């Protein structure tokens, strides 16, 4: 929760002489800026500095002039200025405005913006190799390839890994040539600029519709002014190629570009497409890159030596020097919402950052969020549509399988109707995808002797069996334990039974139903690196699997040319519960899944297994009446006064003592005068749907207000009036995406 931060009055002073007082913002959990003396040599406004704080040295940013007002002898000096460009004023404004919107302390915002490791370290070195003046004792084909790579690149030096990859040999070949003096080892700084991306490099030939939209997006970027565009294109319509043309225009203008992706799994394939378009690979920023590469990326972005960054949501907080374009691919994806720490939506904050620095935004999706759809309808965003798939590919046909009419035995999940379709694809050497949005083997493990359901020791959640690993896992806190032989409650052995399907159980059934098929399982909880996942997806795309079984990981941007049949095992699963976005998310997910089929020259069909084919959402999916669906969904939300037609905040109180948590929550509701003054409605307190996580009891309050209400000041005043016990935490989520 944001605490008041004492900020000095605005000053246009941009440089501070040695000994002058400067106000420094640190990433430490403090409620104020700290005064220090500028170091020898002085410092600029926005400089990243190292300062003493108690016995420690911490990183901070010069935020303005110091305030003084106490004994100057007690004011310590800045230790030194870090050798990186100062934080720009636009970045300071961005961090402050995100903090104001999300009710986050400015110190926590600075932590987001300084997450590069080793900023105070001297530049790291790496070993690279070039040709020496000696000949090998004997020439082998592998050695000849290595030497050939170096000769072909005109003396350019490479790391051992790069040489091995380019030459297609093992690293031992490179090491052997080094020992013989054929290759010479050099040391060079790791933080090198990224290869130049050529905006004029030939890209793919665009269709008429693609070229038209690409031209309009290029014009928006060329204006060098803020504007947000919604790029809505059916799956397989070539949205990526279109918005890469906007990136090309941005690079041609000499400005930097950022492309946000929702999944690391998509990054590797996307980097290949960027390299094809611009002749080199861009910078990467996500949890899958090494610590060294994160440091390099942060520094090079700040020095303007990274033209394009491809990254996860936190890439928004990199220190861009001249940001001209932000693309949010799959903008509807729920993973853009940060659900812990700073609670922000990267899609919305991308629009905010672009508005501050005069950049363009492209929000791309086949199934846009209702928020973006409504903003386009209201004229806040400009909308561009791609209605046709690229080339000869056609949109898939949608069919429902009514499970009420299927004779489906207990413990079986693949209907006979769907199985026949899969068999027909096997005969035609085509691929099928079976989708179930449940990880693990089974969502519940129950004892048939006493009825006990195995739950997490620290959460009010059932543990999920992961049979591939032989363990039970809590999907809330991540706790795991071995699968027991006996019931933990009654100690009877051999009576534990799996209830309900998970993706592993579906794979087990598929092996029995289709014994001659090659089956591949894709799930986010599989232990695979990004590279391994890329290789697995590539092998599937090349036809090394007949049936793909997966969770929602498979719905995001992957291209399987041989895939012509998609089977949604339980289309009703997402419609359960009270989430106000349930209909929207089910519609998006199944339409995205169906879009995996028929992306080449063979027609695709999606089969939806459901117990309620007459449900309005299922009907909208089957008919493809997207605009009617969005209009109906918007009308319902508007009538209810909920986002995007109303303001909402979720408040969760958590602590080890349930009675204490409820007492504080009830006190908050009784003393909510700041909220009542703005006519906000308060719901609760009530136990959160998942009422205990990691041993802490959770109680939820919802606050709702009219669309035009400025909710944050009232929430801040309300929270400031409460003095909770030290062991009780209160989190406030503006525009919550989940309600657990």
Image: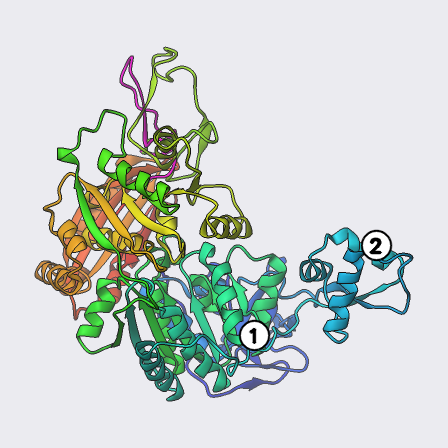
**In this picture, residue 127 sits left or right of residue 565:** right
Q: Is residue 618 magenta?
A: no
Q: Which residues make up the magenta segment?
A: 438-460
Q: Which residue is mark 2?
A: 176
Depicted 294 relative to depicted 543: above or below = below
**In this picture, residue 118 sits left or right of residue 471:** right
Labels 1 and 2: the sequence-earlier one: 2
Q: Which residue is mark 1?
A: 279
Front residue of 545 and 377:
545
Depicted 79 relative to depicted 202: above or below = above
Q: Position of residue 711 (x, y in %)?
A: 22, 65
Q: CA distance from mark 1 to mark 2?
A: 31 Å
Front residue of 268 and 111:
268
Q: Position of residue 512 (x, y in %)?
A: 37, 28
Q: Secondary structure at mark 2?
A: helix
Q: Residue at x 60, y 60 (%)?
A: 117
Of all residues, the one furthest to the front in this rendering is: 428
């Amino acid at each position: 929760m944001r605490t008041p931060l004492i900020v000095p009055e605005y000053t246009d002073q941009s440089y501070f002489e040695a000994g002058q007082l400067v106000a420094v913002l640190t990433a430490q959990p403090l409620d104020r800026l700290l005064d220090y003396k500028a170091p020898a040599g002085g410092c600029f406004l926005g400089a990243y500095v190292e300062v003493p704080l108690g016995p420690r040295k911490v990183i901070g940013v010069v935020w303005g002039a110091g305030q003084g007002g106490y004994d100057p002898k007690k004011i310590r000096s800045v230790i030194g200025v870090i050798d990186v460009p100062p934080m720009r004023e636009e970045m300071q404004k961005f961090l402050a405005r995100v903090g104001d919107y999300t009710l986050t302390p400015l110190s926590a915002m600075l932590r987001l913006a300084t997450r590069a490791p080793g900023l105070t370290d001297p530049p790291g070195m790496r070993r690279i190799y070039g040709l020496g003046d000696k000949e090998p004792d004997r020439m082998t084909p592998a050695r000849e390839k290595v030497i050939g790579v170096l000769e072909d690149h005109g003396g350019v030096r490479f790391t051992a890994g790069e040489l091995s990859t380019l030459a297609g040999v093992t690293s031992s070949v490179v090491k052997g040539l080094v020992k013989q003096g054929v290759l010479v080892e050099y040391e060079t700084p790791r933080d090198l600029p990224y290869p130049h991306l050529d905006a004029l490099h030939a890209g793919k030939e665009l269709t008429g519709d693609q070229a038209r939209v690409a031209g309009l997006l290029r014009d928006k970027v060329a204006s060098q002014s803020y504007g947000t565009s919604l790029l809505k294109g059916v799956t397989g319509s070539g949205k990526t190629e279109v918005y890469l043309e906007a990136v090309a225009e941005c690079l041609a203008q000499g400005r930097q570009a950022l492309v946000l992706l929702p999944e690391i799994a998509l990054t590797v394939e996307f980097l290949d497409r960027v390299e094809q378009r611009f002749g080199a690979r861009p910078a990467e920023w996500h949890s899958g890159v090494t610590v060294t590469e994160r440091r390099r990326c942060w520094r090079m972005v700040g020095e303007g030596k990274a033209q394009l960054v491809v990254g996860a949501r936190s890439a928004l907080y990199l220190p861009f020097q001249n940001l001209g374009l932000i693309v949010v691919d799959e903008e509807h994806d729920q993973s853009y919402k940060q659900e812990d720490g700073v609670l922000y939506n990267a899609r919305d904050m991308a629009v905010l950052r672009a508005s501050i620095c005069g950049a363009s935004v492209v929000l791309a999706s086949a199934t846009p969020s209702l928020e973006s759809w409504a903003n386009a309808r209201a004229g806040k965003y400009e909308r561009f549509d791609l209605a046709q798939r690229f080339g000869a590919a056609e949109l898939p046909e949608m069919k429902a399988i009514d499970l009420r009419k299927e004779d489906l035995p207990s413990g079986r999940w693949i209907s006979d109707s769907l199985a026949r379709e899969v068999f027909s694809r096997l005969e035609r050497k085509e691929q099928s995808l079976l989708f179930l949005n449940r990880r693990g083997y089974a969502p519940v493990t129950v004892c048939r002797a006493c009825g006990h359901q195995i739950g997490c020791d620290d959460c009010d959640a059932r543990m999920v069996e992961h049979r591939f690993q032989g363990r039970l896992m809590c999907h809330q806190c991540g706790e795991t334990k071995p699968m027991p032989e006996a019931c933990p409650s009654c100690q009877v052995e051999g009576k534990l039974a799996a209830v309900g399907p998970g993706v592993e159980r579906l794979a087990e059934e598929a092996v029995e139903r289709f014994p001659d098929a090659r089956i591949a399982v894709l799930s986010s909880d599989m232990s695979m690196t990004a590279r391994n996942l890329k290789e697995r997806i590539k092998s599937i795309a090349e036809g090394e699997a007949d049936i793909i079984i997966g969770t929602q990981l498979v719905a995001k941007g992957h291209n399987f040319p041989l895939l012509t049949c998609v089977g949604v095992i339980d289309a009703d699963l997402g419609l359960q519960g009270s989430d106000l976005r349930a209909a929207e998310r089910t519609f998006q997910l199944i339409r995205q899944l169906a879009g995996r089929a028929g992306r080449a020259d063979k027609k695709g069909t999606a089969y939806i297994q459901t117990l309620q084919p007459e449900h309005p959402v299922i009907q909208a999916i089957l008919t493809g009446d997207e605009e009617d669906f969005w209009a109906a969904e918007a009308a319902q939300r508007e009538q209810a006064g909920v986002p995007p037609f109303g303001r909402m905040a979720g408040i969760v109180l958590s602590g080890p003592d349930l009675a204490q948590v409820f007492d504080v929550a009830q006190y908050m509701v009784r003393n909510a005068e700041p909220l009542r003054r703005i006519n906000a409605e308060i719901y609760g307190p009530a136990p959160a749907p998942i009422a205990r996580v990691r041993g802490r009891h959770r109680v939820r309050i919802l606050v709702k207000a009219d669309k035009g209400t400025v909710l944050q000041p009232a929430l801040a005043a309300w929270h400031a009036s409460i003095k909770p016990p030290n062991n009780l935490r209160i989190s406030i989520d503006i525009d919550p995406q989940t309600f657990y």
